[in-house]
Image: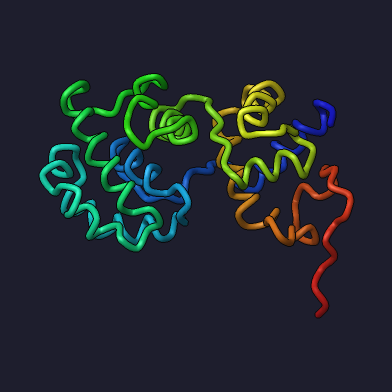
């Protein structure tokens, strides 16, 4: 895919959604960090539902440490891998208190040193909470980048590197959000809805999905 076509894809997505953001609900960088940690192998809907109950009770590192693993588990038991996630959340909160004064660090190395925080989670927090032009590649973005030809890669790191290389600077901050939303609602895994895709004319995916029979 050439540079003009890539730019046209981002211009089209921008025209449809000028100010995209995460669908996770949060009010502080800390709430975002916890929500993203819990979102692995879970839906944003399920995380939001759980956090609407937990955050009014505990939305600081100290409050979550006081809640403890058992307390956190009660709020997140509807989310996949909840036992491991509860353990990581409490452990991460202890580190935030001990090493960062209870604040969420805005550096990748510091974020990735927290239990339960990998590169993708760090990228989301850096982008959404702190405005860094990072691109967090999840299954949706990996699929869209490869299927459309926008930024092909054999694994998530390769796709991330390709997106960082090929995404025009003015679209870097929002690229993650546009692509994840496009993959979640249009360019779906099993049956991409090509018939109402705004970037279909620019997409290099050949076996376009026809519209369903009316």
What percent of the width, then of the height, locates residue 202? 83, 42
The residue at 60%/35% (across/down) is 175
Between 73 and 159, the one nearer to me in the picture: 73
Residue 183 placement, left or right of 47: right
Q: Position of residue 38 (x, y in %)?
A: 37, 48
Farthest residue, direction left? 66
Identify the image quadrant of residue 96: top left
At x 71%, y 24%, the residue is 166
Relative to 132, say whether 62 is above or below. below
Q: Is residue 193 left or right of residue 109?
A: right
Instruction: Judge from the rendering whether residue 175 lies leftward or rightward of residue 64; answer left or right.
Output: right
Along the viewing direction, whichever of 194 and 34 lies nearer the viewer = 34
Most distant residue in the bottom direction: 214
Q: Is residue 192 left or right of residue 84?
A: right
Q: Indicate the quadrant where residue 9 lies.
A: top right
Q: Quadrant of the C terminus?
A: bottom right
Q: Position of residue 24 (x, y in %)?
A: 41, 49
């Amino acid at each position: 895919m050439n540079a003009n076509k890539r730019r046209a894809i981002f211009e089209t997505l921008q025209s449809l959604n000028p100010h995209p953001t995460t669908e996770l609900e949060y009010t502080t960088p800390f709430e975002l960090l916890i929500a993203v940690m819990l979102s692995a192998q879970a839906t944003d809907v399920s995380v939001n539902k759980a956090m609407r109950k937990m955050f009014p009770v505990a939305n600081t590192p100290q409050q979550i440490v006081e809640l403890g693993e058992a307390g956190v588990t009660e709020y997140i038991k509807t989310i996949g891998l909840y036992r491991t996630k509860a353990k990581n959340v409490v452990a991460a909160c202890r580190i935030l208190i001990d090493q960062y004064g209870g604040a969420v660090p805005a550096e990748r190395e510091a974020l990735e040193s927290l239990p339960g925080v990998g590169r993708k989670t760090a990228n989301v927090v850096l982008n959404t909470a702190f405005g860094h032009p990072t691109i967090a590649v999840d299954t949706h973005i990996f699929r869209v980048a490869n299927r459309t030809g926008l930024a092909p890669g054999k694994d998530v790191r390769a796709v991330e590197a390709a997106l960082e290389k090929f995404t025009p600077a003015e679209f870097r901050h929002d690229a993650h959000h546009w692509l994840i939303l496009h993959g979640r609602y249009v360019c779906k895994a099993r049956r991409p809805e090509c018939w109402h895709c705004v970037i279909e004319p620019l997409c290099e995916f050949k076996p376009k999905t026809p519209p369903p029979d009316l």
